[in-house]
Amino acid sequence: MAEEIGYVPRKGSAYAHDESSKLIAVVINDVGNPVYAEFVKSIQQQCRKYGYSIMIIDSQEMSSIERIMLGLIEAYVAGVILVSSRLSDANIKKMAKIKSLVLINRAVQGIKSVIADTRTGLEQAVHELRSLGHESLTYLSGPTDSWQNMVRKETLVSICRQNDIALNCIPCSAPTYNGGFACLPQFSQHATSAVIAYNDIMAIGFMTALEKCGMEVPEKVSVVGIDDIPISGIVNPTLSTIHIDRATIGKMAVDELVSRLRGGNLHRLLKPIMLDSRFIARGSTGPRRD
């Protein structure tokens, strides 16, 4: 990977070999997103227990930055944790041949990963909305190059089909507050009585846009997020969401990586470790009202 950008590591560096480096690179997509902040906190705490420090790389949701930065730092770190990586499978496999690597919320064949399985939480959310009388649903999509977004969308398509719910998907400009806010014009063209957003931040932005247009939540539209970030229980109305145990995911990712760095069984089963999710009903979901 380093060769692709013309980078040559300095000889004689104290961090040039895995056995001497006590530094782990943690690559995230957005340092301002509280989801990644929680992952970083969990990873850092667990790394300290093993005597490792971390280097944080913010890719700014761009695979090009992720690829270039990994090429620049690969000679100085013992291993890498990629959180919701936007890299292609091929580039991830290339990196895994150079450094010990573990993925969070991304599945690539032959690479160890720890993943939040949102199917259970999404099933619970859709069943709750169906019981409240909602017969149509809009999904506010995440980034097109996001593996998580692809899985969540496909899962919703399957669940809605099974529950006889009409599903509309809206592409959003960014997985941010502003991205969610900007979805309202598209939503208004084919409005549904319920919405599930790619993440909580987008859901909160979308709720704000609805309220500013006089569309009360949940009286006019029920809204569900994914992640259960701390602010989701504080906003008004409080946000119904799907809880993901990021602390455990981060801890397990470090355990897996350190095991490999310390000569653990590198040929053991590389099947992803899946952690379940659950739906939390709060103030943003309610009965359908015509």
Image: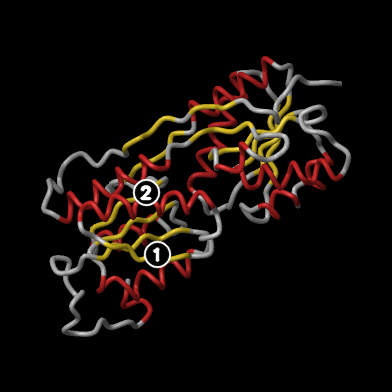
User: Which quadrant of the structure image shows residue 262?
Assistant: bottom left
Quarter holding the C terminus is top right
Q: Does residue 148 lie above or below 56 as drawn?
A: above
Q: Does residue 69 lie above or below 172 as drawn?
A: below
Counting from the top left corner in percent of width and height, residue 89 is at 38, 55
| Mark 2 → mark 1, Cα distance in angstroms | 13 Å
Q: Look at label 1 and name its amino acid.
A: Ile
Helix, strand or loop at mark 1: strand
Counting from the top left corner in percent of width and height, residue 31 is at 51, 60
| Residue at 45 percent of width and 58 percent of height | 28
Whether tag 2 and tag 1 are in contact, CB under 8 A, the answer is no
Q: Does residue 11 lie above or below 268 as drawn?
A: below
Looking at the picture, the colour scheme in use is: secondary structure
Q: Residues within 10 Å of mark 1 (few under 14, many from 20)?
A: some
Q: Look at label 2 and name its amino acid.
A: Ser
Q: Does residue 32 lie above or below 9 as drawn?
A: above
Residue occupied by mark 2: 42
Q: Which mark is residue 56?
A: 1
Number of residue marks: 2
| Residue at 34 percent of width and 73 percent of height | 71
Q: Which mark sits nearer the N-terminus, 2 or 1?
A: 2
Q: Which mark is residue 25?
A: none
